[in-house]
Each structure stands twice: as C-alpha cells, then as structure tokens.
Image (spheres, rainbow, N blue to C red):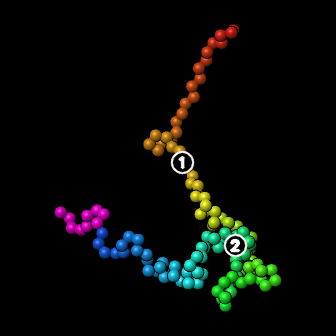
Amino acid sequence: MKPGAKPGQRFGGRSKGTPNKKTDEIRRLVQEACGEDWDPVQAMALAAKRGGFEVWDPSTNAPAVDVATGQPVLQPISEKTRATLHKEVSEYLHPKRRALEVTGEEGGPISFGIGVEFVESAGE
C-alpha cells in the first residue's frame, strides 16, 4: 500500500473559513481609514454618478463640505475614469456574458439536412 493521505484527507494548514493574515490586516487598515460601513462599490458608484470622489477632511474624519452650498467637496475625475467606474460597478449587477460554442455530436461539426417534398395540388 502506498504511503500518504487518503483522498480528501488534509493535514495542517489553515482551517476552512479562517481569514488569511494579510487579508485580515488589509481589511482592518481599510476599516480604520474609511470606517466600518465604507463600501468600495458604493464609493465607485457615487463617484461615477457625481463626476468625482468626496474629499476627506482628516481633521473631522468626515467628508469635506462646502460651507457656501452645504454640498460635499468633490475631487473631479476624467470622463474616461467615470466610464471605467460605471463599467466596474455594472459587473456587480450584471454577470459577464460568455461566448456560446455550438457543436454537433461528440464535439464535431453540426450537420443538418433540408428535405423537400413535392405534392400535387388538389385544385389543378
């Protein structure tokens, strides 16, 4: 009998569902910088819609607000960047379509025939 693990048997390593240390650290840093409720997809969608990203005020740890208008201060983005953001956000809403390959039996070419039948007309 050959030595080694049986199929499906594992030894050591991370248990299923345990987060990777690097991923966990990055997640913690992002939440620390942006807040617990920050959603990158929502941020991209808002920037695409508004034409810019909100400017963050580090002194208040909140978005900067224009005193005259009361509206968030935006860092403008190019039209190309807006288009890219719309494209990226849309992929969360609509799955990418794949090309469909149609083949015949056992992956071979498709074969078909056309049958023509001539019948005598009843009225002539």
Task: Judge by depth and name the residue closer to the eye, 16 or 123.
Answer: 16
Query: Under tag 1, what secondary structure?
Result: loop
Residue ID at (60%, 58%):
94
Magenta span main SS: loop
Question: Which amino acid type is marked by label 2?
Answer: Ala
Residue ID at (51%, 43%):
103
Considering every residue shown, the one lying at the far right of the view is 68
Residue 115: x %, y % from top left:
57, 25
**Residue 33 horizontal side relative to residue 46, left or right:** left
Q: Quadrant of residue 62?
A: bottom right
Residue 47: x %, y % from top left:
69, 73
Instruction: Residue under label 1, please give it.
Output: 101
Considering every residue shown, the one lying at the far left of the view is 1
Category of crowding for the residue at label 1, using alpha-carbon neighbours closer than 10 angstroms: few (below 14), some (14–19), many (at least 20) = few
The answer to whether residue 1 is above or below residue 109 is below
Q: Is residue 123 magenta?
A: no
Residue 44: x %, y % from top left:
65, 71
Q: Nearer the viewer, mark 2 or mark 1?
A: 2
N-terminal label among 2 and 1: 2
Query: Under tag 2, what secondary structure?
Result: helix
Residue stretch in magenta: 1-9
Q: Alpha carbon of mark 2 to alpha carbon of mark 1: how far?
A: 38 Å
Task: Judge by depth and name the residue closer to the eye, 52 or 6.
Answer: 52
Q: Could one spot residue 109 in this view of the protein?
A: yes
Q: Quadrant of residue 43?
A: bottom right
**Residue 17 horizontal side relative to residue 61, left or right:** left
Instruction: Residue under label 2, please give it.
Output: 47
Question: Which amino acid type is marked by label 1?
Answer: Glu
Asked if labels 1 and 2 touch by Cβ distance under 8 angstroms, the answer is no
